[in-house]
Image (spheres, rainbow, N blue to C red):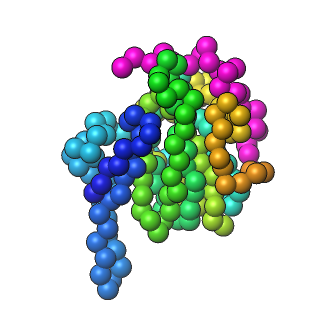
C-alpha cells in the first residue's frame, strides 16, 4: 500500500495493494494498522454509501463543531473527488486538491477534519463509499458553493446536477467567520 502526500497537508492519496490472478482480484479496503503507519491515525465511526448518476455533483460539504475526516473510495464507476482546505489561518486556506477515483484504479483519498469535500460523477453511475471520523450531525453542516471563483476548482463539467442544499452553497468569503481557526 502506498500513501502519497498531496499539496494539502494531511490529504493523502492511497493506492492499495491489489492482488490479481485468474479468479479476479483481492485488496484490503481498510486495515487500521497499515493506514495508521501511512499517516491516517484515526478511528472511523460511520460508513456511508451513495449512488449517483452521471453529472451529479455532491458537495462541497463540511461540519463545523464536529468536523469529519473521510476515507473515500469508489466501488462502481468513476468520480472526480475534491478536498478544499477551509481551516482559517492555514497556509493552504482555500486551496484544493483533486483525484480521479474509480472502481478500476482502486485509489482512495483521505481528507482530514477541517476540509470541505465533494465529488462529481463521470461515469453513467457511481457508487461511493466513505468512512467518517465523526457522525453526521444535521444543522452542523455547511455547503461551500461548488463553483466559488475564490477557490477556483477546475471541475470536469459545467452544468452539474445539484441538490437544493448544494445549489444554495455559500462562498468561502461568506463562510469565513464561521470556519474553524487552524491550530497546528
Residue 55's spot in the image, x, y percent? 71, 57
Q: Residue at x 44, y 30 (%)?
A: 113
State yes or no: residue 11 in magenta: no
The quarter of the displayed image where residue 132 is located: top left
State yes or no: residue 163 in magenta: yes
Looking at the image, residue 181 lies above or below residue 119: above
Residue span colored magenta: 161-184
Is residue 129 visible in the rendered image? The answer is no
Q: Quadrant of the C terminus?
A: top left
Q: How many discs mark residues in the rendered view?
A: 0
Q: Residue at x 66, y 38 (%)?
A: 152
The answer to which of 139 and 17 lies nearer the viewer is: 17
Is residue 100 visible in the rendered image? The answer is yes
Looking at the image, residue 150 lies above or below residue 127: above
Q: Residue at x 28, y 57 (%)?
A: 1
Residue 99's spot in the image, x, y percent? 51, 52
In the rendered image, the residue lying farthest to the bottom is 22
Q: Residue at x 36, y 39 (%)?
A: 44
Residue 157's spot in the image, x, y percent? 71, 54
Q: Quick check: 121 left or right of 85?
A: right
Amino acid at each position: 500500500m502506498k500513501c502519497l502526500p498531496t499539496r494539502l497537508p494531511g490529504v493523502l492519496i492511497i493506492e492499495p495493494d491489489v492482488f490479481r490472478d485468474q479468479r479476479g482480484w483481492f485488496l484490503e479496503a481498510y486495515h487500521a494498522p497499515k493506514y495508521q503507519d501511512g499517516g491516517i491515525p484515526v478511528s472511523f465511526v460511520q460508513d456511508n454509501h451513495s449512488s449517483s448518476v452521471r453529472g451529479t455533483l455532491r458537495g462541497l460539504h463540511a461540519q463545523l463543531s464536529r468536523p469529519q475526516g473521510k476515507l473515500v473510495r469508489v466501488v462502481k464507476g468513476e468520480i472526480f473527488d475534491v478536498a478544499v482546505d477551509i481551516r482559517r489561518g492555514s497556509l493552504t486556506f482555500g486551496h484544493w486538491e483533486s483525484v480521479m477515483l474509480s472502481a478500476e484504479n482502486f485509489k482512495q483519498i483521505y481528507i482530514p477534519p477541517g476540509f470541505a469535500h465533494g465529488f462529481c460523477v463521470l461515469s453513467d453511475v457511481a457508487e461511493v463509499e466513505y468512512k467518517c471520523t465523526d457522525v453526521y450531525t444535521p444543522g452542523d453542516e455547511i455547503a461551500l458553493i461548488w463553483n466559488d471563483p475564490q477557490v477556483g476548482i477546475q471541475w470536469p463539467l459545467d452544468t452539474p446536477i445539484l441538490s437544493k442544499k448544494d445549489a444554495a452553497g455559500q462562498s468561502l468569503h461568506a463562510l469565513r467567520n464561521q470556519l474553524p481557526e487552524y491550530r497546528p
